[in-house]
Amino acid sequence: MAGFELLLSKLRSAARQLPYLAPALSLVWSAARPWTLAWLVLLVVQGLLPVATVYLTRALVDSLVGAVGVGGSWESVRPTLLLVALMAGILLLAELLRGATSWIRTAQSELVRDHLSELIQRKSIEVDLAFYETPDYYDHLHRARWESASRSLALVENLGSLLQNGLTLVAMGAVLVPYGLWLPLALVVSTLPALYVALRYSVRQHRWRVDTTHDQRRANYYDWVLTSAEHAAELRIFRLGDHFVETYRAIRARLRGERLALARSQGVGELWAGAFGLLITGATLGWMVWRAIQGFLTLGDLALFYQAFNQGQRLMRSSLEHVGQVYFNILFLGDLFEFLAIEPRVVDAPRPRPVPSTLARGIRFEQVSFHYPGSERYALEGLDLEIPAGEVVAVVGPNGAGKSTLLKLLCRLYDPHAGTIRIDGIDLRELSLPELRRRISVLFQEPVRYSETAARNVRFGDLAAGDELADVEAAAQAAGADEAVRRLPGGYEALLGKWFRGGNELSVGEWQRLSLARAFFRRSPIILLDEPTSAMDSWAEADWMDRFRELARDRTAIVITHRFTTARRADTIHVMQAGKIAESGTHDQLLAAAGLYSDSWRAQVRSPGVGGSG
């Protein structure tokens, strides 16, 4: 009784996952509709062929017995040979259909895999930047990315097998009914333990996968550290290779041991379920043999029953395994749909206002406070800052003062927890989000390196601006990147980076200049630069700043920098400390004030080249 209650509990648990079934099937249908239709037709035909084989077996056995009884004359053997030819034709047709199904499944799987990848990619670029700050996001992404395609395809495969097996089972049940109404029931009872085992271990395997997601990601991380160019130099210099290999090995050994223990437990359960099924089969077969001895059944009937019951039991067991796999795959697809259901919080207002094409008054931060997800320390706290339209403003301060956070909030990658940011008096949250970002050119502290051509690296600043090479070259010249690009084989059509064959690697400073060119390529009214000259020497810095002032004419620019030689060329300098503006003024005014800026200026002049990132 307790076992029956446990089975019902598992069935209720499985039923709770059914809401994910319809979206999963819809996903496959939308990705590969014609191929799925063809596949379903083939499944129906393949599901009915075994029944034809069973009936032909009975006719063949009875025909063969009759032919032997009359001495095996040609007249008596000819119907038997006809049945043999018909059975061979059915077997050949089954093989042909199996091959066609395999080809169709390959086409279907490729379409589904690509469709799912696109869904995950689009959701990844839609979610807020804040999601990338949490381990839970990466756990969801890991399970969605690594499991979704295979699980969706496996789910379709399992459901197809269930459909095919179900058709065959219904037909087999109809075959068995004339020999006893209790026989189909015995067939079902013999496979109930297998259903219990399938559901129980589907739940356990999914729980294990979820519980070990963090460890699986850590193993992937250590594998990446050991095999990526980014870490290659330090691994050799600091002799870290053995440490990371051992760490990776320890995690994998633990995961492997847990997986094998789970598989061993499942194997024992399946063994007991199989033994119970054999006991039922032996009892029913003994009853049929006794009926045949009494003369109630022919040898053909006995052959038909054995094939029908044996195949029926095999199909029932296979179907129940597929039920378990359907449940298992739906559990993982739940992770996919949870990931796809993530809704961004930084969104357009119900009726967004247009963004000014040019700034008339400027940008204003009013009592802005903000802390990053997972942190209780405020990056900005009660910050007030005004940036007049058309000015070049520098923001300086120690690491962690909140300088880069200003730029992220102005781009609405995050929204402040308190206070308001306004452009020409309009709250950022009231403006059209795509249009706002279209009006901003930005270079963040770590320049992004695209393994594309040099020209495309610049054009990524504004893909809607067209393909005029002259505009690309002008942006590169303004950023000081033109000379480095022209030295490459192929110039602006040279492939950059070492990810692909024929790529050219640039120095850190050259990558930074190229990123600057990308920011300049977008002719927007607001320019945001985070440490734009950190990889330049003092001569290049002075030359670049002269050209930048010309480029920024009639545009509003904010430059985050540790270099006071860069900051001094700005119209206004704001000194940040602990998330607030501590001082503001021109270079000369701040020196005369003898405050934080003055002390830092004198320290930096005494130690030229000292700087950092912040």
Image (cartoon, helix red, strand yellow):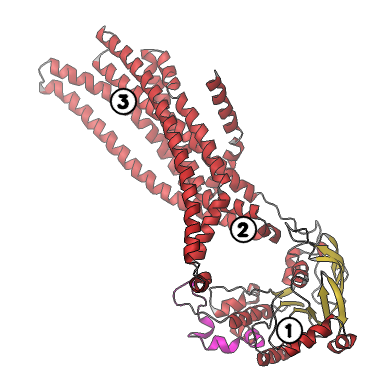
Question: Which is more N-terminal, label 1 or label 3?
Answer: 3
| Residue 271 on image: x %, y % | 40, 29
Which residue, given by chain and number where applicable, does mark 3 sit on? Answer: 54
Find the magenta span and give its range: 475-502
Residue type highlighted by circle 1: Arg
Which residue, given by chain and number where applicable, does mark 2 sit on? Answer: 122
What residue sits 31% from the left and 21% below the top? 306
Give the alpha-carbon distance from disc 2 to disc 1, as whole Å: 38 Å
- Quarter of the picture holding the C terminus: bottom right
Element carrying mark 2: helix
Q: Quarter of the image holding residue 462?
A: bottom right
Label 3: how many Cα within 10 Å (few below 14, some 14–19, many 20+): many
| Residue 184 on image: x %, y % | 42, 19
- As displayed, is residue 261 above or below residue 518? above
Whether residue 492 appears in magenta in the rendering, the answer is yes
What residue sits 79% from the left and 88% below the top? 602
Label 1: how many Cα within 10 Å (few below 14, some 14–19, many 20+): many
| Residue 185 on image: x %, y % | 44, 17
Q: Is residue 537 visible?
A: yes
- As displayed, is residue 96 above or below residue 114? above
* Of the pair 557 and 90, the residue shown nearer to us: 557
In the rendered structure, find residue 563 and report the number of the disc placed on it.
Answer: 1
Whether residue 497 appears in magenta in the rendering, the answer is yes
In the rendered structure, find residue 507 and report the number of the disc placed on it.
Answer: none
Element carrying mark 3: helix
Residue type highlighted by circle 3: Val
Question: Which is more N-terminal, label 1 or label 2?
Answer: 2
